[in-house]
Image (cartoon, rainbow, N blue to C red):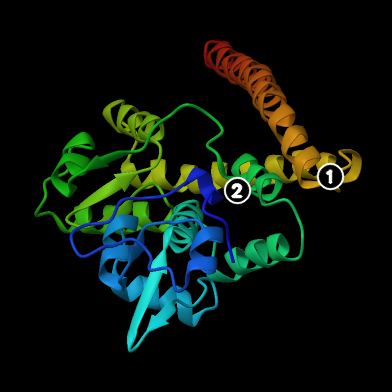
Amino acid sequence: MVTGTIGGVKGGRGRAGVRDEHHHGHHEGRHRTRMTTYRIDDLAHAAGTTVRNVRNYQERGLLPPPRREGRVGIYDDTHLARIRMICRMQERGHTFATIAELLGAWQRGADLGDLLGLEKALTDPWDDERPERRTAAELLAAFGLPAADEAAATALERATALGLVRPDGDAYAVPSPRLLRVGAELVAAGVPLDAVLAVTARIREHCAAIAAEFVGLAVAHGHLGAPAGAAAYIDRLRPLAQQAVQGLMAEAMSGVVEAEVDRRIAGIARTREP
């Protein structure tokens, strides 16, 4: 069974109705560590999830079965720790299959701390930008679009498809507010929104290709065998990749702008020739 320290959780306090674990027999009681116990609804509440999710984790084999007292399932702090870890990994985009593989690796003797360190290195943001939440009206206003306009609905659909915004209840999550502001500034400068979205899609493809090149370097030369070593290498690669792209982008922009200015000057000169 998973120990109560997984994910940094060393125990929890239940709500009313949660009680200490019963000890059956004097000898057993002397050798067992007392811990908080939960019924399924109390466990879900303590973990910040739903009873349905807890049952789903059990059905998928991600959560050990509870101890039974009659027809009632009794959970403890090890179950709470496991659920919190599962939820954290889901928030970082892992599928149930990937979570099961990581848990299975730990149960086969791998160091779960190293595995989670690698997972953190792979999924942590590559800058300090924090996502924001905006209503549809706020998003459309940033681009000068009326909420009732048909073009507005189309623009939101395209932005969602590109991953620039994500539906979040009655509003939208904005993963990169910086990118949103760039788009709004381009529209304010007179660039049509359709063109902004189109160039965003193309730039994203180019960035994916650049990222693949750096990952290829890591795979070919990074000695990524052990999870701990792979995590350290990725952390080292992170600022280097950003600095390289920033430097090359500045150089490329300078060259392209100069070439365009030269082309326009040459065009003006030709029009003035007798």
Q: Sequence-wise, which precedes: disc 1 or disc 2?
A: 2
Q: Is residue 218 above or below residue 84?
A: above
Q: Position of residue 262 (x, y in %)?
A: 62, 14
- Secondary structure beneath disc 1? loop
Badge 1 crowding class, 10 Å Cα cut-off, few under 14, some 14 to 19, many 20 or more, is some
Q: In the picture, which quadrant includes the C terminus? A: top right
Determine contact: label 1, label 2, CB under 8 Å. no
Q: In terms of depth relative to the viewer, which is nearer, 150 or 71? A: 71
Badge 2 crowding class, 10 Å Cα cut-off, few under 14, some 14 to 19, many 20 or more, is few
Q: Position of residue 50 (x, y in %)?
A: 29, 67
- Secondary structure beneath disc 2? helix
Q: Position of residue 115 (x, y in %)?
A: 69, 50
Q: Position of residue 92 (x, y in %)?
A: 50, 51
> To which residue does mark 2 refer?
205
Horizontal side, residue 78 vs residue 147: left or right? right
Amino acid carrying mark 2 in the image: Glu
Q: In the picture, which quadrant includes the N terminus? A: bottom right
Residue drawn at 26 percent across, 64 percent down: 42
Amino acid carrying mark 1 in the image: Leu
> To which residue does mark 1 refer?
224
Q: Exactly how many numbered labels are in the figure?
A: 2
Residue drawn at 73 percent across, 46 percent down: 212
For the residues labelled 1 and 2, the Cα–Cα distance comes to 26 Å
Residue drawn at 30 percent across, 47 percent down: 173
Nearer the observer: mark 1 or 2; the answer is: 1
Q: Is residue 83 above or below residue 9?
A: below
Rendered image quadrant of residue 149: bottom left
Horizontal side, residue 99 vs residue 138: left or right? right
Q: In terms of depth relative to the viewer, which is nearer, 92 or 57? A: 57
